[in-house]
Amino acid sequence: MYLLKKYCPKNLEGVVGLDKPISEFLKYLGKKPVLLYGSPGVGKTLSCYLVAKKLDLELYEINASDYRDTESLKKVLEIAKQYSIFGKKRLVLIDEVDGLSTQDKGATKELIKILKETKNPIVLIANDAYDQKLKSLKYYCKLIQYHKIHTNSIVKYLKKICDEENVDCDDNILKNIAQRSNGDVRASVLDLQSLISKNKLLPSDYLAPRNYEENIFNSVRYILKTKKIDIAKDVMNNLDRNPDDFFWWIEENVTKEYQETDLENALNFLSLADTVKKRIRKRQDWNLFKYYVDFISVGVALSKEDTYRKFVRYGFPTFISKMGAMKAKRKELEETMDKLQEQMHCSKRIIKEELPYLRQFMDL
């Protein structure tokens, strides 16, 4: 935590890669409640602290998951209606609003009351603005997405820290740290600190892998729920998977989300994307790749007449599961053929031809 605290930005100018959302944040703050959403570690809470400092506001922060009952939130409403004891305006920050219990409907209603009656600027923070818990709440707010920080921006930031700390660093190691952080600056700094040994960086192989399975589900949800081109493009710009893999995630789950004409339109775009992919492979014309990406994101997002409000449980792509199973079987077959080749002293082609007969009297 030493480096994280030491190099925490002291003003908005020091924040990495968030110029656009912070500018929008400042534009709407005080005009209507603001809902900041995005992955953990991208700077949502930090920007609130720095905005309060810049505008000379007293920050009043609560965690919504700790105020789940109506009575507790009524106290917050009273604070939101008042100025500080020094006559300054407050910036009321309500963090983790997606941590509210879906069973306590009164808490959500009380939060909406706070948004309507507050005399101070108010900011809500969530990881996913499209969570069912926020269905009624988000319509009272200006939604501002905090996207994942670009790898190059994180590398520059880590390089600056290494220079300040006199740490001998390898650019490839810094790039690996930035890539595995998945746009999370906080995580990248913690990883950097764990690799520093005697003013040198250890190889990034020492770091344990992270699980980004949850992020791919969020990406699918954004595409299938939004009707905005900029949001669909942001999803693809910050995607932590290969677009070819994401194609199968969309193909698997669009049939669960869309219906009738909307589904037909979406499948037409996926069909076009598949055609473009085949042409790219055949002609090696990678200029077409941007159309492939737009078809599976913007095309699918705009295929629906209106956003579906129902809850849908998304699933892992069947195609990828089958391909994984086939890959495992091929690997097992290769290992069997390697063993037989040592004993039979013949080519793998002959072993493959004779394998159905060999299985009858050998334990293969």
Image (tube, rainbow, N blue to C red):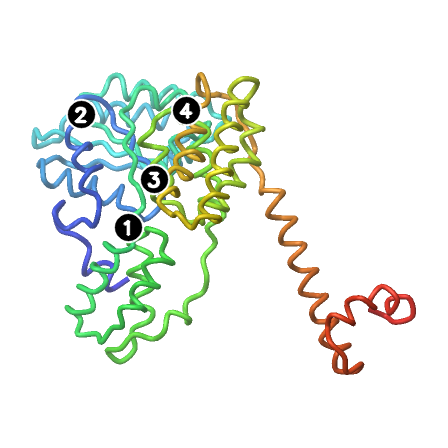
The residue pinned by badge 4 equals 302
Give the farthest residue toward the front: 283
Within 10 Å of the Cα at label 4, are there few (<14), some (14-19), or many (20+) other Cα atoms? many
The type of residue carrying mark 2 is Asn
Is residue 308 positioned above or below 155 on the image?
Answer: above
Disc ID at residue 18: none
- Return the x and y of residue 5 as percentages of the image width and height: 22, 58
As rendered, which of 67 and 91 lies closer to the eye? 91
The type of residue carrying mark 4 is Leu
Circles 2 and 3: CB distance less than 8 Å?
Answer: no
Of the image marks 2 and 3, the number of the one nearer the N terminus: 3
As rendered, which of 25 and 261 lies closer to the eye? 261
Q: Give the CA separation, mark 4 to mark 3.
A: 22 Å
Closer mark to the observer between disc 1 and disc 2: 1
The residue pinned by badge 3 equals 38
As rendered, which of 233 and 131 lies closer to the eye? 233
Q: Secondary structure at mark 1?
A: loop
Disc ID at residue 120: 2
**Residue 190 sits in quarter:** bottom left
Within 10 Å of the Cα at label 3, are there few (<14), some (14-19), or many (20+) other Cα atoms? some
Q: Give the CA separation, mark 1 to mark 4.
A: 26 Å
Of the image marks 1 and 4, the number of the one nearer the N terminus: 1
Within 10 Å of the Cα at label 2, are there few (<14), some (14-19), or many (20+) other Cα atoms? many
- Return the x and y of residue 256 as percentages of the image width and height: 58, 28
Closer mark to the observer between disc 1 and disc 4: 4
Considering the image in quadrants, where does the N terminus appear? Answer: bottom left
The residue depicted at 18 percent of the width and 26 percent of the height is: 28
Q: Secondary structure at mark 2?
A: loop
- Return the x and y of residue 220 as percentages of the image width and height: 47, 36
The residue depicted at 29 percent of the width and 23 percent of the height is: 141
The residue pinned by badge 1 equals 150
